Image (cartoon, rainbow, N blue to C red):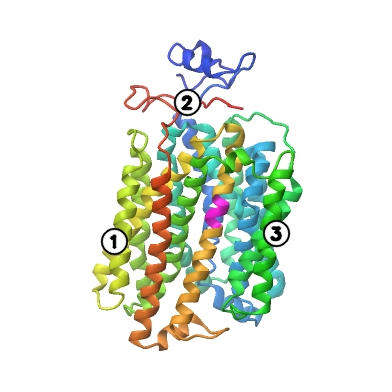
Amino acid sequence: MNKHHTPQHDPAHDPKHGAAHHAATPAGKTEPRPLTHPEIRSIVIGIMLAMFLGALDQTIVATAMPTIGRHFGNLADLAWVVTAYLLTGTAVTPLYGKLSDIYGRRVMMLTAIGLFVLGSVACAMAPTMTTFILARALQGCGGGGLMALAQTIVADVVSPRERGRYQGYIGAVFATSSVGGPVLGGFLTEHFDWSAIFWINLPLGFAALGMTSNALRKVPFHPRKHRLDVIGAVLMMTAAVAMLLALSWGGRDYDWISAPIGGLLVASAVLWALFAWRLTAAREPFLPLSVLANPVVRCAALAGACNMGTLVGLTIFTPLYFEVVLHLSASQSGIALIPFMGASVVWSTISGKVMTRVDHYKRMPLMGLTAALVSLGVLAIWPIGLPTWVVIVLLSVVGSGLGTLFPISTVCLQNAVPRAQMGIATGAANFFRSLFSALVVAILGAIVLGGLGGETGAVMETLARTASVQELAVAFRFVFLACALVLAFGLTFLIALEERPLKGPPTGSAEAPTAPATPIPDVK
């Protein structure tokens, strides 16, 4: 197809694609022409920049937090710098998915970027720690929508069979921000000012606004009349907030067995129960029961959530392991983490491309997660005493295994729902990924604090550096065992995942590498 065709081009008249497209178009409704690969690349580049903003700000503040605490004269509330962003970002993720189904991806992506940039300015200009934390919460309201919307937009413009190659690029953005964020944050804080880590979001944000605003005009959108279940949204978000507050405060600000933590957990359970009731009572619930009842969506979302929780947990606690067990410096720990993250990116890209060419696309992640479990088992048996290069190799195998599942879990989930539910299904999957990540991080933190004999309010890094070899061995043995257990659940959900054929050009089709993206019928 000539890339200079106008948007009004009728694919039914295309001799190469006419029959398939005509069959996929409902009677009396003109389907927009399929996008060419250069057009898809321009869209993907725009949303990758937008997503990079949100992913980067989850990690860039890590190395600047001590400086921020000294600037405001408040070290006690530093944990809220991360927690506030996590709370709002996790809670609004499914809301963006639903709203994008109603109002369109472009409108919601621009809204998310705008909120993120506004929150960044507020962070840089905050006069007190309290206003700074509130600004971080506002920033999270924008950043929370970027990842889910990016994956949903990819689902809008390419068929499931062709989608894996683009999901690998999304994984690359996440890994780059995870490794590069702390390095960039430390450089800007040391050579400029801590506020520079937020001011830098302005040029990046405006560039993302310009690129996505133009690129997303090409994305076809069919307006649908939906009712926004505000009550369901409030119940879901408040239940999540109560749970995350309990996980964030437990063992740090309050004892796990205490009235505040118990009250939050009870409140969360009650709110989740009310949310479940709302799903059955509402005419158009916030999370449609047809989506939640879909076994493919359920297994893919839970497998992806376990995978993401393991990745985030290891990313946060492995540097501490490097420093206190292997006695590496902070900069050496960052360098040693690169093979782990790099392997996840490489194998995510490979797995995404392979699944576009094979029918049994589960085989690679099944082997990858099995190898990852074996490697975590070795680290759990010998948490101390292994040469540094052996530890790095084992962690690289873990990263490789985790990478093989990411594109599979996302594409399988999107392949199993109609286009009308693409946004809410992807948003729900990302919500559970964020929730599982917070849960795993909280559990690993409790394991390390408990294993090192820490009490409420203790600083984990200080305890780790003063602990005995035996205490370190016990603490990190259970860290690796906990990660292996979470990943084992992910492998179980992957085994249960039905391997449905992916929609799109047939495997081995001559048109697959060069043809425009195949539109997906809007199944009601």
| Residue ID for mark 3 | 271
Percent across and percent down for residue 463 are 46, 85
Find residue 218 and name its label: none
Percent across and percent down for residue 504 are 44, 27
Q: What's the residue at 41%, 85% (across, down)?
A: 465
Residue 109 is covered by the magenta coloring: no
In the rendered image, the quadrant that contains the C terminus is: top right
Which secondary structure, mark 1?
A: helix
Name which residue type carries label 1: Val
Mark 1: few, some, or many residues within 10 Å (few <14, many ≥20)?
some
Q: Nearer the viewer, residue 238 or 58?
A: 238
Name which residue type carries label 2: Thr
Calculate the distance from the C-alpha at mark 1 to the C-alpha at mark 2.
Answer: 39 Å
| Residue ID for mark 2 | 518
Query: If you read the primary sequence from the N terminus, does the residue marked by circle 3 or circle 1 appear first?
Result: 3
Name which residue type carries label 3: Leu
- CB under 8 Å between discs 1 and 2: no
Q: What's the residue at 60%, 38% (across, down)?
A: 290
Percent across and percent down for residue 146 are 58, 49
Query: If you read the primary sequence from the N terminus, does the residue marked by circle 1 or circle 2 appear first?
Result: 1
Mark 1 or 2: the one toward you:
1
Mark 3: few, some, or many residues within 10 Å (few <14, many ≥20)?
many
* Magenta range: 430-434
Q: What's the residue at 23%, 74% (across, down)?
A: 387
Residue 433 is covered by the magenta coloring: yes
Mark 3 or 1: the one toward you:
3
Q: Would you say the magenta stretch is mainly helix, strand or loop? A: helix
| Residue ID for mark 1 | 374
Percent across and percent down for residue 233 are 71, 50
